[in-house]
Every structure is written in C-alpha cells, then in structure tokens.
Image (cartoon, grey):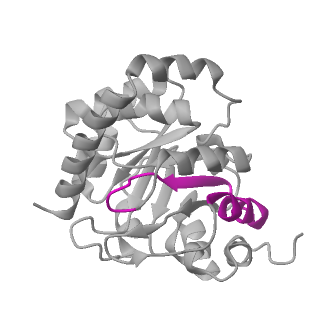
Amino acid sequence: MSVLDRIVAGTREDVRRRRGEVPLATLESALAKRGEDRPFSEALTPPGVSVIAEHKRRSPSAGTIREGATVADVVRAYERGGAAALSILTESQHFGGSLHDLREARAASTLPILRKDFIVDEYQLYESAAAGADAILLIVAALESHELSGLHVAARALDLDVLVEVHSGEELECALDVLDADVIGINNRDLDDFSVNVQRTFELLHDVPAGKTVVSESGFHSREQLDELERVGVDAVLVGESLMRAPDPEAALRALTGAEGER
C-alpha cells in the first residue's frame, strides 16, 4: 500500500469510530448554531497571489514541525501577516491534527477556513460544517469518481466551498470532467514518497480552463516564487511547513505577501 492508501484506510476506520461516538443527528443539530458565512473561494480572487496559511503539527516525512505554540497564536500571526485564508490540517494519525484545532482557529480568527483532511465520507462534511469550516479539500487520488462527485455535491449543499486537489494531468481531467470544479489545487508534493516538484504547477496550469481559480500547494518559501506564480496566472498558494517552522510566522508571512512594512 502507498502512504496515501494507508492514510485513507485509516481515515475510513476513524470515521466509523467517530460516527459511533457522535451520531450524524447531533452534527445536523449543531449546524443550526453555525457562525457567520466566510466565503473561502472569494478570498482567493483579488489581484496578486493570495496566501492560504496552514496550521500543520507534523507530517509523515518531516515529523514534528512546531512545538510550544497554540493554534490561536499561529492563526492570529497569520492573520496579522496578511493571509487571505487559513488551512487547518485535522488528520490525527499521521499529521497530529484534530477538529479541536479547527474550532480553536475559528474562534481566534476572522479568516475563512479550509479543513484540510482526507475526506472520504459525507459524515466528515457535517463534521466540517459543525466545527466551523468554510471549505473542504477533496483529493482526486483518494477517491473513486462516483465518491468524488457525490462528496462535491453534498459539500456544496452544506454551503461548503471545495478545493479539488490534483497531482497529474489525468486527475485534472477528472476534476474538470466529473465535477467541473471551480477551485483547483495543484499539489506539488507526491503523496507516495512526499517529494516536492514545484514545476508540476507550471506543467499542469496550461490545461486548466480560463475562469477557474488555481491554488498551488507545497514547496513555496520566497516572494520570488510567488511573483513567478503570479506571472503565469496562479491565484493562490497554500503554504504550511515553512511558516510553521519560522521563528516568527507573522514576519515570514509578511515577507511572502510583500507586506513587511505594513502594520
């Protein structure tokens, strides 16, 4: 099994467990108390390259990334640093995240929030909405076509925006043909060996139709890289590990967004 296959299998088992602990009806009731709408997709479309700043505790390839800082500390620094949106990694077994992290981020920041996880079941959509997510991630490589389509429809019915992640031309074709996805995430990280190739964005971008919002994910740490993405028409970039490792995440984000002199 690949790393992705193992993570997805573990996620399916975790969902079965959580469904037994928190019935779907409980999550449906919680939706009535949902806070104000924070449109995720709209936050990515202003001129320039918007930054989705990610809270990520650890990864299978890098181990523990940051200790000693709360989710609230990190996301407030991101908001001050000019992030357009937040990504909160909630997968627990391999990345150390949780829905509690998402709820803490929601309480600490006014930015729209993407729940970044391995979404394989409609139950997770209700979890996401109830916990305060404004958008969810669907990974084409992790789902069959019928699952991808069903989850996309169900997410939109819950007023959740969807970032559809691809890693290859075949996956991009699926995202466009099966979903006609509005927001395409091109992940430069290989989910089999976790290597990063930022050229993947440039290779796939020319096959994305005009009018789609494109997010490049993984491998970015400098303003010069973002300038190049802006030149070719990328709308947003998702940055996590380099910000989480920075001694001052706010200053690191200001350097990326070009807002060093703003206070």
Image quadrant where one finds the N terminus: bottom left
Q: Is residue 181 above or below residue 82?
A: above
- Vertical comparison of 113 with 73: above or below: above
> Does residue 178 appear in the picture of this structure?
no
Instruction: Tell me which residue sits at (55%, 74%) in the image.
Output: 67
Residue 228, quarter of picture: bottom right
Does the rendering let one see residue 39? Answer: yes
State the image coordinates of residue 201 (x, y, percent, origin top left).
Answer: 40, 66
Q: Residue furthest right?
A: 263
Answer with left or right where residue 70 lies relative to residue 20: right
Q: Is residue 108 left or right of residue 151?
A: right
The residue positioned 39% from the left and 34% from the top of the image is 124
Which quadrant of the figure contains the C terminus? bottom right
Image location (x, y in percent) of residue 161:
52, 36
> From this viewpoint, which residue is outermost toward the front?
21
Residue 127 vs residue 133, the one in the foreground = 127
Horizontally, residue 143 falls left or right of residue 125, namely left
Return the residue found at the far left: 1
User: Which residue corresponds to the image point at 61% horizontal and 54% vertical from the top-left?
Assistant: 86
Residue 49 vs residue 125, the one in the foreground? 125
Residues shaded magenta: 71-95
Quarter of the image for residue 262 reads: bottom right
Per the image, is 262 magenta? no
135 or 203, which lies in front?
A: 135
Q: Position of residue 193 (x, y in %)?
A: 23, 73
Q: Compared to 136, does 241 lie above or below? A: below
Image location of residue 221, percent across then percent down: 56, 79
Magenta stretch encompasses residue 86:
yes
Please tell me which residue is depicted at 63% across the width and 69% down the height of the picture.
69
Q: How many marks?
A: 0
